[in-house]
Image: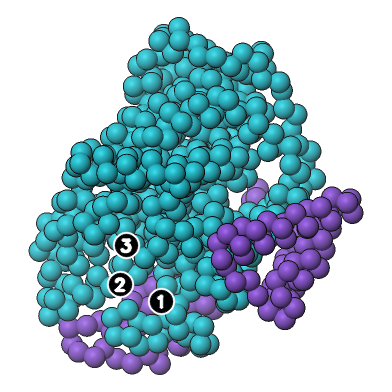
């Protein structure tokens, strides 16, 4: 393991990889600082730039973008009370009051140091957990993979943002999309009424549309909003005495972040709120939280950045995306001809180990860049929304064309964008659609393989302990929210 | 539009999708051997689930129709949103006919105008800047052959 990690470090210290880490970080900061652009949209927009790149620089750039975008979200949360990412909402609770009383520099410093610390600790945890998981997963057969896919999809219940029915409908829509094209086992064409559809619905253009182009239309809706006023940042410097006081929060935050990040479907936003609440609960002055307590910032930021390496664990070790950003990263890996999952550690160890090394190396680098660049990154909020929207739209067209050098992908992106916009308007979340597109193929292929292996009976699915456990957990994961929603609706009806 | 009506319409749309896919699935060949599910089973499961949930959505939409407290779906700057969609639609249609650079040169300023940017100098600079970016990054650095 350490040998491979050393190799990973030697790989990322090659000049082209260092440039990509730097570029990914800078772009990530800007994306994170811009309210409306989330890390998943940022990754989707940057993927087209990686089509012709080598695998290692492409992946380290995207991973650094992912983590830096989570950093960047805190900058605008503190300075203008507009969290750049949903996960930075808890940061705004104490960050903005501090900025209002003239302590913006101090708040930013704490936020950036806590972010860097959170991602460093969490990256180390990733190294020590992802490798054993991947090793164990090497023994997985079709039954386990089918159960894993079912488990991944069952988590849609936690991504349904309010309505379970709508979340599962989004999942069905995504699953139906992946059935278009050649049947993966027999090669029979399904629902392919034009020649282009024989190859299926291309995943990346579809998700660029669902996430980025649909967001363009939301930006156009809000194009009249005036850019927020940015305060002058004074007093950036490392407040050692304050950091010392919050050492327990700084230990707890990354651990909560990593643990929550590993659970598919949970992610950075939930991690930051749990960490914030835990810090408040453990504090001797809980009443000061929400009024400008630096510990609130540290709790939120150390956890939301800790969640990023956490989310990479199931992605790299099992090939299961737990969040929209992770699903998009799977798309990026596939474009490079790589299959995420345990075999990645055997066939292409340079990829996961370079990602580990990049995460560990990038944490202090991002902290330094964040401390010196916060004044610049926040300027991105001054760009009028209408201009940003059109630039993003133009990149989505260009990027989806670059995917396969034909107009079919551009049309898929455009339709995906319009559908994604309509879905979001009627509160059907886009994430289940994307997750279903990633896991649907894995689910169908492995179900059919498992059945063929056991002569057409489902015996294999229930005779393998890991598969059985995963299936039981999936059923519980699906049923509990259904019962909860039913009870809530009943209570509402009575009231 | 009220949320109940939106749910009713989306339920109907999902039901139509399920019916269309169901009719197409009927035409798929049977499994090649007894132990395989064949190409139709997986789509059938999804279609079945989708149809049930679409009916739930329709039922909810009908039931909540008279509820005065339901949320309302609003589209701010509706005309701009529709014009931008139309602009991008025309842009994509023009690309294979007149090429990427000329179609972008025509469409980008129009879309910027639709989006609400009214300053001609800004529009010209942005359009020119984006074309330069596309040429340098995608064409020259990444080697993507643009149409």
Residue closer to the observer: A437 or A367: A367
Which comes sooner in the sequence, label 3 or label 1?
Answer: 1
Q: Residues within 10 Å of mark 2 (few under 14, many from 20)?
A: many
Q: Secondary structure at mark 1?
A: helix
Q: Which residue is mark 3?
A: A339
Q: Quadrant of the N terminus of chain A?
A: top left
Distance between mark 1 and mark 2 Cα atoms: 9 Å
- Going from N to C along the chain, the mark reached first, 1 or 2, is 1
- CB within 8 Å, label 1 to label 2: yes
Query: At 18% from the left edge and 45% from the top edge, which residue is drawn?
Result: A132
Chain seen in purple: B
**Residue A401, horizontal then vertical, whole percent:** 59, 69
A321 relative to A356, above or below: below
| Front in this rendered view, residue A361 or A63 | A361
Which residue is denoted by mark 2 in the rendering?
A444
For label 1, the residue is A179
Query: Measuring 20% from the left and 89% from the top, which residue is drawn there?
Result: B33
Chain under disc 1? A
Q: Looking at the image, tell me whether mark 2 or mark 3 is earlier in sequence order.
A: 3
Can the viewer see residue A226 in this picture? yes
């Amino acid at each position: 393991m350490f040998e491979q990690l050393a190799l990973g470090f030697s790989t990322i210290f090659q000049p082209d990889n260092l440039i990509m880490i730097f570029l990914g970080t800078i772009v990530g900061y800007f994306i994170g600082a811009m309210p409306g652009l989330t890390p998943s949209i940022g990754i989707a927009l940057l993927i087209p730039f990686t089509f012709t790149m080598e695998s290692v620089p492409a992946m380290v750039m995207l991973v650094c973008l992912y983590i830096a975008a989570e950093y960047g979200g805190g900058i605008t949360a503190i300075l203008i009370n507009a969290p750049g990412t949903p996960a930075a909402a808890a940061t705004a609770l104490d960050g903005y009051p501090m900025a209002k009383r003239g302590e913006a520099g101090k708040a930013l410093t704490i936020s950036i140091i806590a972010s860097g610390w959170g991602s460093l600790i969490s990256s180390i945890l990733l190294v020590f957990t992802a490798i054993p998981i991947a090793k164990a997963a090497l023994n997985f057969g079709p039954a386990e993979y089918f159960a894993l896919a079912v488990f991944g999809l069952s988590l849609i219940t936690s991504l349904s943002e309010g309505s379970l029915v709508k979340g599962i409908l989004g999942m069905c829509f995504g699953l139906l999309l992946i059935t278009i094209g050649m049947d993966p086992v027999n090669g029979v064409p399904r629902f392919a009424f034009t020649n282009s559809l024989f190859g299926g619905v291309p995943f990346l253009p579809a998700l660029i549309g669902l996430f980025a182009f649909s967001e363009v239309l939301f930006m156009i809706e809000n194009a009249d909003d005036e850019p927020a006023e940015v305060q002058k940042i004074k007093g950036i410097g490392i407040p050692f005495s304050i950091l010392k006081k919050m050492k327990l929060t700084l230990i707890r935050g990354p651990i909560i972040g990593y643990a929550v990040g590993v659970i598919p479907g949970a992610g950075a936003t939930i991690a930051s709120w749990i960490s914030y609440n835990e810090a408040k609960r453990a504090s001797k002055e809980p009443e000061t939280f929400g009024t400008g307590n630096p510990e609130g910032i540290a709790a939120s930021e150390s956890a939301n950045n800790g969640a990023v390496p956490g989310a990479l664990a199931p992605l790299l070790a099992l090939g299961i995306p737990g969040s929209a950003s992770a699903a998009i990263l799977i798309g990026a890996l596939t474009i490079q001809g790589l299959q995420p999952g345990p075999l990645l550690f055997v066939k292409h160890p340079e990829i996961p180990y370079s990602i580990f090394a990049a995460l560990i190396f990038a944490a202090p680098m991002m902290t330094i860049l964040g401390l010196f660049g916060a004044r610049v990154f926040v300027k991105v909020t001054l760009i009028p929304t209408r201009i940003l929207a059109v630039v993003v739209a133009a990149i989505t067209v260009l990027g989806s064309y670059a995917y396969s050098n034909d107009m079919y992908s551009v049309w898929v992106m455009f339709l995906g964008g319009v559908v994604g916009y309509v879905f979001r308007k009627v509160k059907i979340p886009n994430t289940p659609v994307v997750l279903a597109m990633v896991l649907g193929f894995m689910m169908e292929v492995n179900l059919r393989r498992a059945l063929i292996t056991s002569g057409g009976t489902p015996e294999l699915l229930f005779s393998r302990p890991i598969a059985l456990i995963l299936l039981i957990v999936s059923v519980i994961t699906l049923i509990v929210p259904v019962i909860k929603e039913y009870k809530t609706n009943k209570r509402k009806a009575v009231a | 539009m009220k949320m109940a009506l939106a749910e009713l319409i989306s339920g109907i749309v999902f039901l139509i999708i399920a019916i269309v896919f169901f009719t197409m699935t009927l035409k798929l060949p049977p499994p090649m051997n007894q132990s395989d599910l064949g190409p139709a089973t997986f789509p059938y499961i999804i279609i079945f689930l989708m149809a049930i949930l679409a009916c739930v959505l329709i039922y909810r939409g009908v039931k909540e129709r008279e509820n005065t407290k339901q949320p309302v779906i609003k589209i701010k700057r509706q005309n701009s949103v529709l014009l931008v969609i139309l602009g991008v639609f025309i842009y994509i249609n023009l690309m294979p006919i007149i090429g990427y650079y000329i179609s972008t040169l025509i469409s980008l300023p129009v879309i910027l105008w639709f989006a609400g940017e009214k300053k001609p100098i800004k529009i010209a600079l942005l359009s020119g800047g984006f074309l330069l970016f596309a040429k340098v990054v995608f064409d020259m650095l990444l080697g993507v052959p643009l149409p």
